Amino acid sequence: MADFGKNGTRTVSKNRLDVTLRRSGGNADFLHYKLAARGAHPVFSLASNDKLIWSDQDFPAPQANYDRKWPGDDSELDGSDMINTLLLSFFTAVEYKLVVELCDKAGRVLETVKDIDYTSDEPGDSFPEMLNVFVE
């Protein structure tokens, strides 16, 4: 039986459901999203409270590795309680590895929040990976 869609598997090493970013008092925590993809053309998008913040369309050509630091600045924050959703499509990609790290303003990793592998050879499969983000 598939973990998602018709033929998807999801292998979880680490999966926090929520994370808190310290952004006040001189703090500037951020999330470092790292996405490795295998396949002809990865199709993905990351949204925060339905606002698109990152996708495969941000790149002129397909890549094997993508990364994004979020928020880039406070203008990308939409309040103090958000849901970030990374939607992975298996239309032309067959494998993804997602790592999300909580980092301090100097870029030091405080914690790995997510470390998950996804595979599917079914083009119609997709998976939404969600993370509740609180800001203080």
Image (tube, helix red, strand yellow):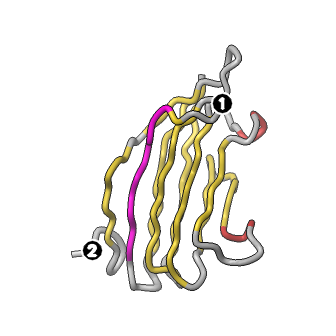
Q: Give the residue furthest to the top.
A: 25
Q: Is residue 104 magenta?
A: no
Indicate the secondary structure of the residue bearing disc 1: loop
Is residue 73 rendered to the left or right of residue 119?
A: right
Q: Which mark is residue 85?
A: none
Magenta segment, principal secondary structure? strand
Name the amino acid, label 1: Ala
| Front-most of residues 66 and 19 | 66
Instruction: Name the residue carrying label 2.
Output: 2
| Front-most of residues 84 and 118 | 118
Quarter holding the N terminus is bottom left
Residue 43 lies, with reference to residue 47, above or below; the image says below
At x 57%, y 35%, the residue is 103
Instruction: Name the residue carrying label 1.
Output: 106
Quarter holding the C terminus is top right
Q: Quadrant of residue 25?
A: top right
Residue 123 lies, with reference to residue 35, above or below; the image says below
Name the amino acid, label 2: Ala
Label 1: few (<14), some or many (≥20) within 10 Å? few
Q: How far apart are labels 1 and 2 at the CA level?
A: 40 Å
Residue 50 lies, with reference to residue 110, above or below; the image says below
Q: How many marks?
A: 2
Q: Earlier in the sequence, mark 1 or mark 2?
A: 2
At x 46%, y 83%, the residue is 124
Report the span colored magenta: 110-119
Residue 116 lies, with reference to residue 82, above or below; the image says below
Label 2: few (<14), some or many (≥20) within 10 Å? few
